[in-house]
Image (tube, grey):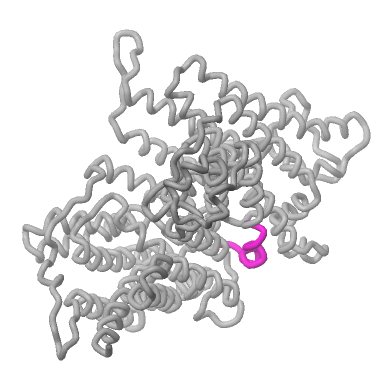
Amino acid sequence: MSEPVGVVNASVTSSPRGLWCRLGPLWSLVSLLAIVYVVTLMNSFLGDSVQVQLQYALVNLIIVVALQIFIGTSGVLSFGHVAFVAVGAWTVGLLTIDPELKRNLLPDLFPFLFDLNAPWLVAVVIGGVVGGLLALVVSPVLMRLNGLQAGIATFALLGVVNQVLTYWSSVGPRSGQSMVGIPDVLNLQTTMLFAMAAIVAAWLFQRTRPSRLLRAAREDGIAAASSGINVVSQRIIVFAVSGIVAGVAGGLFALTNRVVQSSQLNIELTFVTLAMLVLGGMLSLSGAVIGTLVFSLVDVLLVRLQNGVEIGAYVVSVPQGARAIILGLILVGMLLFRPSGITGGREFVWPLRRERPLPGMPPTNES
Amino acid sequence: MTGQLIQSLVDALSAGATLGLAALSIGLVFGVIRLANFAQAEIITASAYCLIFTWELGWFIAVPLSILVAVAMSLLMEFTVFSRMRSANPATLLIASFGLSFLLQRVYELMFSNNVRTAPVASGLAQTVEFAGVRIQLLSVATIVIAGLLLLGLHLFLTRTSMGLQLKAAAADFRTARLIGIPAGRVIALSFALSGILAAAVAFVLTVQSGAVGPTFGVQITILALVGAVIGGIDKISGSLAGGFLVGFVTSMLATWLPQEMSNFKDAYVFVLVIGVLLFRPSGLLIKGRGVART
């Protein structure tokens, strides 16, 4: 199973061979959706506590997909996406909490926010728009930077947004308090549909011009620039798109958690989601999905083991707290021994296809 | 008013000195192997735990032991993790150090629980003295003195000894340094050891300040140090130091002088400043031109 991500596929369009090349990526989409579906189905075997964990996992999946859209396409590190998640969550919180409750719980709000209300689905969409707008506004500044500088600047963005949301009581709760009273409307199946929609959107976006141009620039910035690609403007588009997805994820987080607090949407979530992406492999959408699901499933398993599991006559259990350590070890071990992640930055392709190098292409090496 | 001004200046100088040391400890390693080591936070935490647990045995045991722990941790990280990742790019290295940081925090949680551990470490330094109408925290003065002595020592080491010169050369241009026969492994280990010593100094100051240590004790300062190092110019040892100092100084000044309702946002102002600096001087304040674009 090996196929360089996206870039090559477009050039070949004729002959049965070309058909495979076009259907190959479709296969990757279908298999990812199937995996998400199967994992979500598992809840019916595993009970209620797992159902809650799975719902969080699916929300995380959307955040990781958003990260992958930007980091995977541009090759630039971002620690700032949780800022878009946070504004998405804030938006949905403000739009779905009952106006009467809002008046009591969040007395310092701008007056016009008191009566602003929307059905949750609309609120989630608006959350995505707000996330995308924030990304669009800050991107002309951030997208000029590369490497470590980009990492630090996006991190600074997260710092600014988090402080503003923590202390600015005109748009949210007073500092140290949380937004409560978000309605209980989201179930696991709906979250799954959102996760699938995010995957489809990311897959479709991979096939668009900005995404292809930016991937070319990721591989060789100088060559891309000299072929006339304006890297900064392509990055701005991709950043805004990933901001929209992150904003939607934030809205779903608010509806899943039903309490929103700025401290939950900060560095820790940034690390966890980045860890999931690194685990799966940053450069492919499959990596984002597989990384999140593997990380989350190991987590589910470890929670189970913490409570003790009977295998035959023995009760197997791991000590409290060991769960996070094992997850950390998995991440560090992955970076040491397979830094390109589980998928190695490749997408799934039709497993039965015979591998033949494209004419004019160097043979792809099996991994 | 002047009294308050002097007082705030001393506080800001000491905050800047602490953050400068922390940034320097990151910059030293980055200069040599392009690793912005976020797990520096856990070295600081380990050293601080050591101070808390051994303080009752006397400072002459606790302080050397805390330095030893920091250096050992630093070297251990290098040998077990980072030495195996030499070919990785800076972004991957940064993420690896995040992973390590996350892992070690959980280990601390398991070993020492989530609650903070407390001990009156060097409580004598926590008092304030009044001097010509100016109230000054003894710790602030001590911090400035410690930082000054460490920087002087480091400067002498880097300019007067053969090992130090080798390290300086490696930090300036690692590849060329290797070509002229500077032993790579030894220089890298040296940079980790020195950054461990600096981390121990930071841990001492912070532990005296708060008297309480938890699993994420070193995270806050390391984040700010990393930010400072990058805006100062992480490619250059003096750049990291200056950037760290600047961030610490400005944050402390803002905390004192901004009106109450605005001082909540002091970190936000600093971060906006950081983005501005990065936009106009992406390689750092102290790096002229575009800097060395090595990856």
At x 17% / y 77%, what residue is drawn?
A: B138
Q: Residue B59 vs residue A260: left or right?
A: left
Give the quadrant of residue A330. Answer: top left
At x 71% / y 63%, what residue is drawn?
A: A232
Please tell me which residue lies in front, A121 or A9: A121
Q: Position of residue A359 (x, y in %)?
A: 86, 41
Q: Is residue A354 above or below residue B213?
A: above
Q: Is residue B37 above or below residue B107?
A: below
**Which segment did they paint magenta?**
A135-147
- Please identify the quadrant where the N terminus of chain B is shown: bottom left
Q: Residue furthest top?
A: A312
At x 13% / y 83%, what residue is drawn?
A: B130
Q: Residue furthest left?
A: B57
Q: Position of residue B61 (x, y in %)?
A: 10, 62
| Residue A33 showing in the rendered view | yes
Residue A141 in magenta stretch = yes
Q: Residue B267 vs residue B47: left or right?
A: right
Please tell me which residue lies in front, A184 or B113: A184
Q: Main secondary structure of the magenta part?
A: helix
Residue A107 in magenta stretch = no
- Please identify the quadrant where the C terminus of chain B is shown: bottom right
Number of labels in the image equals: 0
At x 56% / y 73%, what residue is drawn?
A: B276
Q: Position of residue A151 (x, y in %)?
A: 54, 60
| Residue B177 showing in the rendered view | no
Q: Position of residue A54 (x, y in %)?
A: 50, 28
